[in-house]
Image: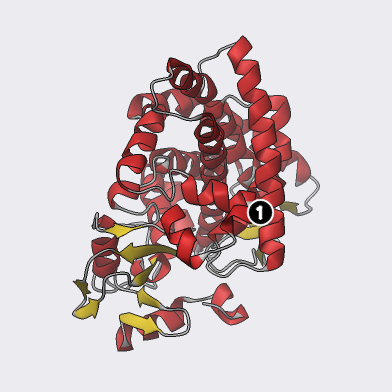
Amino acid sequence: MFTAEGKEDPYPALAELRRIAPVYYHEKLDTYFLTRFADCQQVLSDASCLTPDLTWCETELPHWREHPAAVFFYSSLLRANGTDHVRLRRLVADRFSARRVAVLAERIETTTAALLDRFADATRDGGAADFQELVGYPLPVAVVGDLIGVPHTDQDRFHHYGQDASRLLEPVRTDEDWKRADEAVTALRGYFAQLVALRRRRPADDLVSALLAVREADDGRLAESELLDMLLLVFVAGFETTTSLLGLTVHALLSHPGQLALLREDPALVPNGVEESLRWDTPVRMTERIATRPLTVGGVAIPQGGNITTVLAAAGRDPARHPDPDAFDVLRPDIRVLSFSAGAHYCLGAALARLEGAAVVRQLLTRFPRLAHARRPVRRDSISLRAFTRLPLVTSG
């Protein structure tokens, strides 16, 4: 996973690791790598397995206070545990309810159509266009921007910041990663502080105004810094992984023309096709937990305080859960994925991401019957995320 070959195609190595040591302790990294679906699900669903948070930073990341990105990341909903996590999650859960997602569905469809108009214009003369630039990035930014309350005129500026802030997800961070993440977090916090000030004067039906109402009730549920960090997290988490999902799904379908044909013949299969893409090539390759008590996983004893890495990319291709796991099959029954985690930290935006994926695939099938790869896509340089920085396509393939 940590080599150039592994970043391009980690699955053969992960399958071999699952075969010989499905619960593998890496001494240098001091973590237990889990590669079976059941083991990953067990740990992610276990309330005693915590995410690394500010308490963890005190011993494992001694200079964390010097990094605005670390202060944000390790105190955010994504890394909070226990009562703090419950408190923060309740503040935003309503914005991701089935009712709210249904309201956003029409906006997703119309935004997708408008972005595909641009894509059609860019490929009209038979040339290639970058799907990620024209659709994969701007659609999730527009959707999460609307949810938060970011004016449409401001949304284009966020792509660069989101990518840089997400360097925090890397298991091994360079000085350059920290520099980029710190700068992005500082810039985004500054922007959201201005947006909060605007909504104090002119409230709207958006997440900023909803959180402001909680904050100004002054009942201790939300500090000012937490308000800004919540907006920052919803933005970064809301667009970065969905952008990856869109590119990976389109790439998987174009790489399997027989499966693409099945979706053209029966568009009702599209949601299952998106789910199969999440299983076959998941956007988030791994996530971390810390055991707060001794536990046994897959017959292996993990001590209290043990670091655990659930390799979601391997879990999706576990033959014990999904037979013939390396086959991409949009007809596959009973697909189960851990792409959005499990347990207390299950992703609030999972339904929204799936909705965006289905909208893009359905409209691509209808509008571009000859859609094809133009040349080899360019993968993002990341250990934790599977994503494309460029996905060149033609509509006359």
Picture colour scheme: secondary structure
Amino acid type, label 1: Ala
Q: Position of residue 299 (x, y in %)?
A: 18, 80
Looking at the rendered image, the quarter that the C terminus falls into is bottom right
**Which quadrant holds residue 122?**
top right
Q: Position of residue 39 (x, y in %)?
A: 26, 69
> Which residue position holds label 1?
181
Q: Position of residue 224 (x, y in %)?
A: 53, 29
Residue 180 vertical position relative to residue 364 in the rendered view, above or below = below
Q: Please report the residue visible at 52 percent of the width from the left and 19 percent of the height from the top.
A: 209
* Any part of residue 53 in sight: no
Mark 1 surroundings within 10 Å by alpha-carbon count, few (fewer than 14), some (14 through 19), many (20 or more): many
Residue 380 vertical position relative to residue 356 in the rendered view, above or below = below
**Which quadrant holds residue 155?**
top right
Q: Is residue 323 toward the left or the right of residue 110 in the image?
A: left
Q: Say what secondary structure mark 1 lies in.
A: helix
Q: Position of residue 8 (x, y in %)?
A: 58, 74
Which residue in the rendered view is the most extreme toward the bottom? 20
Q: Nearer the viewer, residue 276 or 195?
A: 195
Q: Is residue 346 toward the left or the right of residue 285 in the image?
A: left
Q: Nearer the viewer, residue 57 or 235?
A: 57
Q: Nearer the viewer, residue 163 or 305?
A: 305
